[in-house]
Image (cartoon, grey):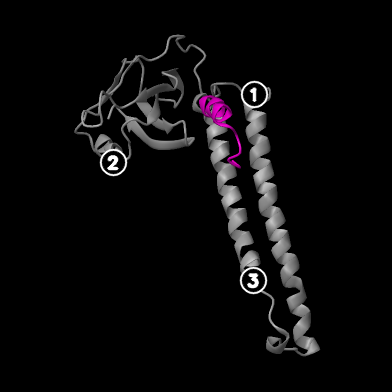
């Protein structure tokens, strides 16, 4: 989050985030909280003290309410800082605690097949299409396109079939977001009628040629 990791450590963290959905979501929460904290801090850094000739001495009756404003401002900043600490702490607990792990499992069916979903990846941005192994008892498939370098979700899509063709509106909009030569990762989850994960492809990295 601070941008101080060396390149090799950043790649290690990005690789871990690509495999852990809980950590990705909570890292995003921490980023949002940090941005909110920075926005609250901006007015304080931009304020300048008035010159003595510009100062207006208010009557005593008008001074008292103004003394509480800095205290309220400080409390709001402490509250946002607490959100940042909570989000980061919860991310670490999910990642390394007793209920964490490399893959989220709370919604997995107990009889889930051990093998993963086989994927057919696109060969270029112009020929953008995705296909995967059909999974029995599937109600729908959840598709996630992930940017491992920026640790961000590029796009999500719910598919009723085991393929998405180039003419589909989802791929037409996705084509505008992808960059040739940039690494991405694709994940497809097969979901049953009770919203449980039957099988998953895991994060599969791909790079579209220039």
Q: Residue at x 64, y 41 (%)?
A: 87
- 46 w.r.t. 198: above or below: below
Please tell me how many numbered marks the rendered image carries: 3
Crowd band around label 1 with a 10 angstrom C-alpha radius: few (<14), some (14–19), many (20+): few
Image location (x, y in percent) of residue 28: 54, 41
Q: Nearer the viewer, mark 3 or mark 2?
A: 3
**Start and end of the magenta stretch?**
1-16
Which of the pair 194/141 is nearer the observer? 141
The question of residue 160 being in magenta is answered with no
Q: Quadrant of residue 122?
A: top left
Taking 15 as reference, is 82 left or right? Answer: right
Indicate left or right for 101 with 135 as reference.
Answer: right
Figure quadrant of residue 95: top right
Q: Mostly what secondary structure, the magenta segment?
A: helix
Between marks 1 and 2 in the image, the one whose residue lies nearer the viewer: 2
Q: CA distance from mark 1 to mark 2?
A: 38 Å
Q: Secondary structure at mark 1?
A: loop
Tag 3 near tag 2, CB within 8 Å: no
Residue 159 placement, left or right of 69:
left
Q: Which residue is mark 3?
A: 47
Q: Check disc 1 and report the residue beneath it.
A: 99
Q: Is residue 69 above or below residue 21?
A: below
Q: Which mark is residue 176?
A: 2
């Amino acid at each position: 989050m601070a941008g101080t990791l060396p390149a090799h450590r950043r790649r290690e963290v990005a690789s871990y985030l690509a495999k852990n959905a809980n950590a990705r979501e909570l890292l995003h929460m921490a980023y949002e909280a940090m941005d909110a904290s920075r926005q609250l801090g901006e007015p304080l850094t931009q304020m300048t003290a008035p010159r003595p000739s510009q100062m207006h001495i208010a009557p005593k009756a008008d001074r008292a309410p103004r003394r509480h404003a800095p205290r309220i401002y400080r409390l709001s900043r402490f509250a946002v800082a607490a959100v940042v600490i909570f989000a980061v702490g919860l991310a670490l607990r999910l990642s390394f605690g007793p209920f964490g792990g490399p893959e989220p499992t709370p919604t997995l069916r107990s009889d889930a097949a051990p093998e993963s979903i086989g994927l057919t990846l696109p060969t270029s941005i112009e020929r953008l299409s995705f296909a995967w192994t059909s999974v029995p008892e599937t109600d729908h498939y959840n598709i996630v396109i992930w940017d491992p370098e920026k640790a961000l979700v590029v796009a999500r899509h719910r598919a009723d079939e085991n393929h998405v063709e180039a003419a589909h509106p989802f791929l037409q909009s996705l084509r505008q977001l992808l960059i040739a030569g940039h690494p991405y990762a694709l994940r497809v989850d097969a979901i049953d009628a009770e919203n449980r994960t039957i099988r998953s492809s895991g994060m599969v990295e791909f790079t579209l040629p220039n």
